[in-house]
Image (tube, grey):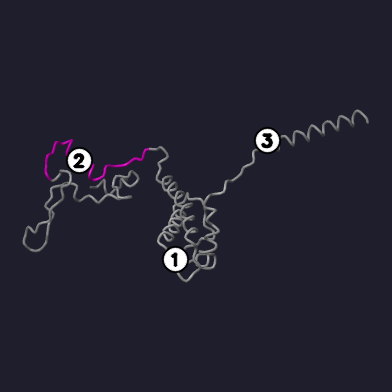
Amino acid sequence: MGIIAMCLIRAYRAHLLITVFCFLAVPCVVVAASPLDEVKPFLNKYCLECHGADLQENNKRFDNLDTSLAKLETLQLWQGIVDQLNLGDMPPKDAPQPTNNEVARVIRVVSPRLQDAYAELRSTGGQTVTRRLNRFELRNTIRDLLYIDDPELRIGNRPRLIDNNGNGRVENTSTDPFRSFPADEIEDGFDNIGNRLVMSDFLLKL
C-alpha cells in the first residue's frame, strides 16, 4: 500500500473518530413526561364521549388538553375536572362509571400540580408589585398623618343611614372622606393584593 493511500486512510479514520466524538458529546434533550399524562387514559375512557373532538358539552374539550398548566385557561379546565370528580357529578350517571380507586388516583395526581400552578401564577418572580393603598390603609394613613381623632375614621366604623328629611330617603351621615371611593377588588378574600390595587384616572380624579 502506498504512502498516499495510508495517509488517506488515516485521515479518514481521524475524520470518522472526530465525527463520532462530536455526536456523542451533543447532549440529548429529553422532554420529561408530565405527571398529568398519567391521567389521559382516564379522560379517554370516561370523558371524551362528551368532551372529545366530535362533541364538546359546555365548550369543554379534553382530547387535546395540554398538560402544561402555565396558561390560566388550561389550569381552569383541569380544576373543573377535579371539582366534578370530587362532587361526583361526572361522568353522568347514565355513562360508564370509574371505580373509586380510579377517581382517587386522578385527584391525587392532579391536585398537587394545580396547587403548584396557582402558586406560580400568583408569584411575582421576586419582583415587587407597584401598588396603591387600599381604602382601609389610606384612611388610617390620613388619620395618623393629620392627627385626626374623628370617630368616623376609626377602625371598624361604618357609616349610618338616617332619614334626615322624613321623606323615606336615607342619607349617609358619615364624614369619612373616603366613603365615595370605589370598593377595592378582592382576591381570595383579601383586599390588599398588590396586582389588584392598581391606579386609574378615575381614582386620580377622586
Q: Secondary structure at mark 3?
A: helix
> In this image, 183 relative to 92: left or right?
left
Q: Whole-percent x and y of residue 186?
A: 30, 50
Which three-letter amino acid code belongs to the residue tagged 3? Ala
Q: Earlier in the sequence, mark 1 or mark 3?
A: 3
Which three-letter amino acid code belongs to the residue tagged 2? Asn
Please, is residue 7 above or below residue 89 in the view? above
Packing grade of label 3 (10 A; few <14, some 14-19, many >=20) is few
Q: Whole-percent x and y of residue 204?
A: 26, 45
Q: Which residue is mark 2?
A: 140
**Is the N terminus in the top left, top right, bottom left or bottom right quadrant?**
top right
Outermost residue, right direction? 1
> In this image, 72 relative to 167: left or right?
right
> In this image, 99 relative to 195: left or right?
right
Q: Secondary structure at mark 1?
A: helix
Mark-to-mark CA distance, 3 and 2: 64 Å
Q: Secondary structure at mark 2?
A: helix
Bounds of the magenta segment:
128-151
Q: Which residue is mark 3?
A: 25
Q: Whole-percent x and y of residue 10?
A: 84, 31
Q: Which residue is mark 1?
A: 58
Q: Earlier in the sequence, mark 3 or mark 2?
A: 3
Q: Nearer the viewer, residue 182 or 154?
A: 154
Packing grade of label 2 (10 A; few <14, some 14-19, many >=20) is some
